[in-house]
Image: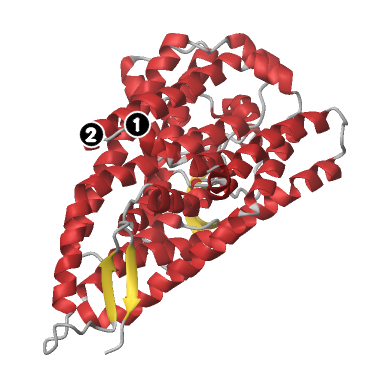
Amino acid sequence: MGQSFLRRHLLLILTIGSVVMGILVGFYLRRLNLDAQAKALVAFPGEMLMHMLKMMILPLIISSLISGLSQLDARQSGKMGSLAIIYYVSTTVLAVITGIILVLTIHPGDPTIKQNIGEGTEGKTVSTVDTMLDLVRNTFPENIVQATFQQVQTKYVVERPKIMRTNDPTMLAALNNGSLDIMRSTVEYVPGMNVLGVIVFCIAVGTVLSQLGEEANVMIQFFVILDKVIMKLVMTIMWYSPIGIMCLIAGKILEIQDLADTARMLAMYMVTVISGLVVHSLITLPLVFFVATKKNPFVFMRGLVQAWITALGTASSSATLPITYKCLEENLGVDRRVTRFVLPVGATINMDGTALYEAVAAIFIAQMNGVHLSFGQVVTVSLTATLASIGAASVPSAGLVTMLLVLTAVGLPVKDVSLIVAVDWMLDRIRTSINVLGDAFGAGIVHHYVAEDLIQHDAERRVSLKHPFDEEKQPLHDLHIDGDGYHRVSSKAH
């Protein structure tokens, strides 16, 4: 009994142990005052883990989305999509409301923090309209190959008037102090995968393949097998992940300049964010799941521990995606067609933890500057945090970038983001694990509502694919659901 349990849960035990070891090693090495190169070497195995997981993201999203959707009809994929979107929007709004209630109740903002930490870095200009336009531009990329490594972003350029010669002292003074400068926005491509564009393209391809019938079988099977190959590679990487996660956490602890002072000054802010995330993950999400499915949410959560720990170590929803697939399909029996559709979309647009954090951080910065936000401004913060979390990339610390958008919306100083950077490395990991938990609960809820449709669809498909002259003979590619609830592809010769 003990040996079989250990064998079955060995990777999970190693992953949990790696988080604990990372913290212990990090704090122990801090006392040795290592130089920059030694710190880089400590973090290097973790950097390699992130490289390997990120390498898998693109082929995983393409193969999983296309293979999943191509085996559904348009009615089923439409129902799944509608349920997923309703769930994403509802939980994100609930997360933001939770964060706002807590930050207004606890009131962590203290003006003295700002004086102690200093002004920090200057932030860049961000316009809400331009950010929304960038979101739409990235949804429909002009070049799908380019979308795999670049995304669109609006850049603001300051243009100086071209005055060749002037003796007017007023004009010269205005030219020197920049009052004649013109701010102009231009659209440019920046490094980083456009996950949203790739997902939209894959959804379109998968949906069209599902409508082509038998002639698309070869193409469907190609993506199904590619999906299995990528998952096999991911599982190989996962046996290396405990070493990588330990080094990632130890490296992050070594990077922090003054851990005690920072923690003391921002303690109430951290307590507020973490309280909000705990309430959302242990009360709000389980309650939504229970109301929707009438099943025990904590039994469901128990099957997701591996994904939760991996998210804690990597701080990336996308990098955790293959582990979330594994937990849902193998531990919880969720149909792979549901996970392959719901999870990639969720990892991109469903950011409950990020939305909560942005709402709390914005109001915290307002309190720290002695600014009283009106009810209308609080509503603006909540709406902008919800939209900004949808636009946030599923990579480490993406929330900091979209934070600028929330601050700009209510006219708060953008440069104050530098105050919360000191503790963001830790909060980023916690909120990412909540994002992953939210995506997984979403997949469980969607599966609850479409499971019967999927079984009926498979039964109809088996009947339609039978040879017209010989009931016993099966076609070359027979798609069906096994007893364990996962989708299989078997090949039987005529």
Query: Looking at this rendering, what residue extends furthest in the left direction?
Result: 469
Q: Position of residue 278 (x, y in %)?
A: 45, 24
Q: Are marks 1 and 2 in contact (CB under 8 Å)?
A: no
32 relative position to 187: left or right: right
Which mark sits nearer the N-terminus, 1 or 2? 1
Secondary element type, mark 2: loop
Distance CA(mark 1)–CA(mark 2): 13 Å
36 relative position to 4: left or right: right
Label 1 crowd bin: few (<14), some (14–19), many (20+), radius 10 Å: many
Quadrant containing the C terminus is bottom left
At 80% across and 30% down in the image, what residue appears?
28
Task: Check the image and report above or below for 326 versus 381.
Answer: below
At 28% across and 40% down in the image, what residue appears?
87
Q: How did the renderer colour the structure?
A: secondary structure
Secondary element type, mark 1: helix
Q: Position of residue 288 (x, y in %)?
A: 28, 31
Q: Position of residue 328 (x, y in %)?
A: 39, 49
Question: Mark 2: which amino acid?
Answer: Lys
Q: In terms of depth relative to the viewer, which is nearer, 196 or 119?
A: 196
Query: Disc number at residue 285?
Result: 1
**Visible in this render: residue 475?**
yes
Q: In terms of depth relative to the viewer, which is nearer, 303 or 101?
A: 303
Query: Disc number at residue 294?
Result: 2
Q: In terms of depth relative to the viewer, which is nearer, 24 or 493?
A: 493
Query: Looking at this rendering, what residue extends furthest in the front direction?
Result: 1
Nearest-to-viewer mark from 1 and 2: 2
